[in-house]
DNA sequence: CGAGGAATTGAGAGCTATCAAGTGCAGTGG
DNA sequence: CCACTGCACTTGATAGCTCTCAATTCCTCG
């Protein structure tokens, strides 16, 4: 079957690196880069804008570029023939996706959740750049380590926790990630739908919804329309750390 | 709390690289190495023997060596305070573990399932070797890619499949891995206990047992005491590919 | 204003966990 | 040599949680 090339409106930014203002500037791959090298990597890629729900790449497609999210939120997932989908991770600005391959094809699906802007790096150039710059190669290893760690934690949650706990874990994880990115916020905005969260946590939309209601009823979170406040982070942590020996 | 250093009987092999006979010789990290480099890496490490159920490393312990399994089967897992455990992967000869770190500590638990022999590499030397040899660095990236892919697939199974399907997926995955290692066998020996499988698949021992019974009753597998035969691999695949549009 | 999607909530079915009992086997010791 | 013990595994019955199906509300968009 033919694979559909993504068709975003190319949006090439001219000179004077916008990297300085990029939220992912000090994250993973770009962290060890400075001045000249940063410019070299930047020139290697193009800036692309994707509308919400647009696929960046599909599992099985011939290997294309590597993407670094600079704005918006995306997901990496895997879908069965019958439509069941597992979201492996949510990607925030600074995160990289599309790197994994299998027989010269993408291993997973990459999809924009919100509108997304990416630094898009052609595969060959990306690999060559890594070969030329050991520090960059190490940065890739570090990035992959971090992803592996995150995925491992997440698998533990999906495999061991029950509904309420999984959602608590998800919220805390998201909050932690924002913290790690230097965004100290008290109110989370959840750009992904309940369906996305369900696919991420291995549950149904209805169960996710009930879990939110349950957490709200217990006074652990508060929902103000678009935003969500973690009222009692410790309470949430107590749930998903499975310290079932809680005061109750 | 004090962490217990593993206390295996050290078993240093002298000259004349045993790598030639190592099942993991042509796998991941060692693949790009030849002659001199292979010897250099070999000398970097020591050979260690572990008894069944002995921990190689524990999550939270200060970062120690990196391990490459050369004989036996091990697991990488994560355990909650209440004892619930999620096994992230089973490691066969050739697989590497103990690489992931977090704040200078191991991220997960490594444990021998059967008796295990490892090539044990001190962290510093390992990293230095990677820094000196770009090919080795790339081999690490490739290895991590493969792991990430495996873990991603596995998470999909845990999140989306039901009991019978998960066990089918597990068996097929194990068989595929053996195939990839060049071991063309029809009868699988399952060295891990039902409890291990349960922890791997996010289910209870009883459910795993019932799933095995179910697969047997459907004529998909046959159990000959220690060994297990995949009678109908296609039937198993039909289960876990979630081609629910099966003839039934 | 109507259409459609996202989210919530309810009721009942279905699957898995839990609790409990029984089997088979290997290692131990009388 | 053979009870005895511990452990892995299996099987049954029941409770509990999640899924499924369905209805409703809210909100956005045309």
Image (cartoon, coloured by chain):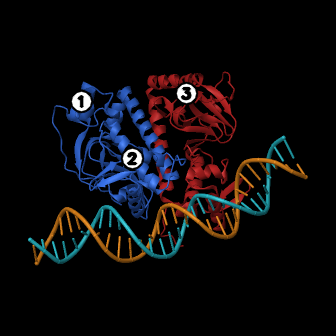
Chain colours: A red, B blue, C orange, D cyan
Marked residue chain, label 2: B
For the point 26% across and 29% down, which residue is it?
B38
Task: In this rendered view, identify the residue nearer to me: B58 or A170.
Answer: A170
Asked if marks 1 and 2 fall on the same chain, the answer is yes
| Left or right of A53, for residue A64 | left
- On the image, numbered disc 2 is attached to which residue? B232
- Tag of residue A111: none
Image quarter for residue A222?
Answer: bottom right
Marked residue chain, label 1: B
Q: Position of residue B231 (x, y in %)?
A: 35, 48
Task: In this rendered view, identify the residue nearer to me: A186 or B46.
Answer: B46
Q: Earlier in the sequence, mark 1 or mark 2?
A: 1
Q: Is residue A28 above or below residue C23?
A: above
How many numbered discs, if any?
3
> Would you say residue A95 is visible in this rendering?
no
- On the image, numbered disc 3 is attached to which residue? A64
Q: Secondary structure at mark 1?
A: helix
Q: Residues within 10 Å of mark 3 (few under 14, many from 20)?
A: many
Marked residue chain, label 3: A
Q: Is residue B102 above or below residue A38?
A: below
| Left or right of A60, for residue B20 | left
Q: Secondary structure at mark 2?
A: loop
Asked if marks 1 and 3 fall on the same chain, the answer is no
For the point 27% across and 25% down, which residue is it?
B34
Q: Is residue B125 above or below residue C26?
A: above
Q: Position of residue A131 (x, y in %)?
A: 44, 24
What is the distance, in whole Å, between disc 1 and disc 2 at their CAs?
Answer: 44 Å
- Tag of residue B39: 1
| Left or right of A80, for residue A141 | left
Image quarter for residue A112?
Answer: top right
> Would you say residue B186 is visible in this rendering?
yes
Query: Given this view, does label 1 or label 3 mark the residue nearer the observer?
Result: 3
């Amino acid at each position: 079957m033919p694979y559909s090339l993504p068709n975003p409106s190319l949006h090439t930014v001219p000179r004077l690196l916008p990297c300085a203002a990029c939220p992912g500037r000090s994250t993973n791959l770009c962290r060890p880069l400075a001045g000249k090298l940063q410019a070299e990597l930047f020139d290697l890629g193009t800036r692309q804008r994707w509308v919400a729900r647009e696929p960046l790449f599909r599992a099985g497609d011939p290997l294309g570029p590597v993407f670094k999210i600079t704005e918006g939120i995306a997901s990496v997932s895997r879908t069965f023939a019958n439509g069941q989908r597992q979201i492996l991770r949510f990607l925030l600005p600074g995160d990289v996706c599309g790197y994994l391959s299998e027989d010269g094809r993408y291993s997973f699906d990459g999809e924009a959740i919100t509108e997304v802007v990416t630094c898009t790096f052609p595969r060959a150039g990306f690999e060559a750049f890594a070969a030329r710059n050991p520090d960059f190669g190490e940065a890739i290893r570090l990035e992959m380590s971090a992803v592996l760690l995150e995925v491992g934690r997440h698998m533990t949650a999906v495999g061991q926790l029950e509904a309420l706990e999984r959602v608590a874990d998800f919220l805390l994880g998201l909050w932690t990630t924002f913290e790690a990115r230097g965004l100290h916020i008290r109110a989370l905005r959840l750009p992904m739908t309940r369906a996305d969260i369900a696919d991420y946590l291995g549950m149904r939309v209805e169960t996710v919804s009930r879990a939110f209601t349950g957490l709200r009823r217990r006074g652990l979170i508060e929902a103000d329309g678009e935003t969500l406040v973690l009222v009692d982070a410790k309470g949430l942590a107590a749930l998903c750390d499975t310290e079932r020996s809680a005061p109750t």
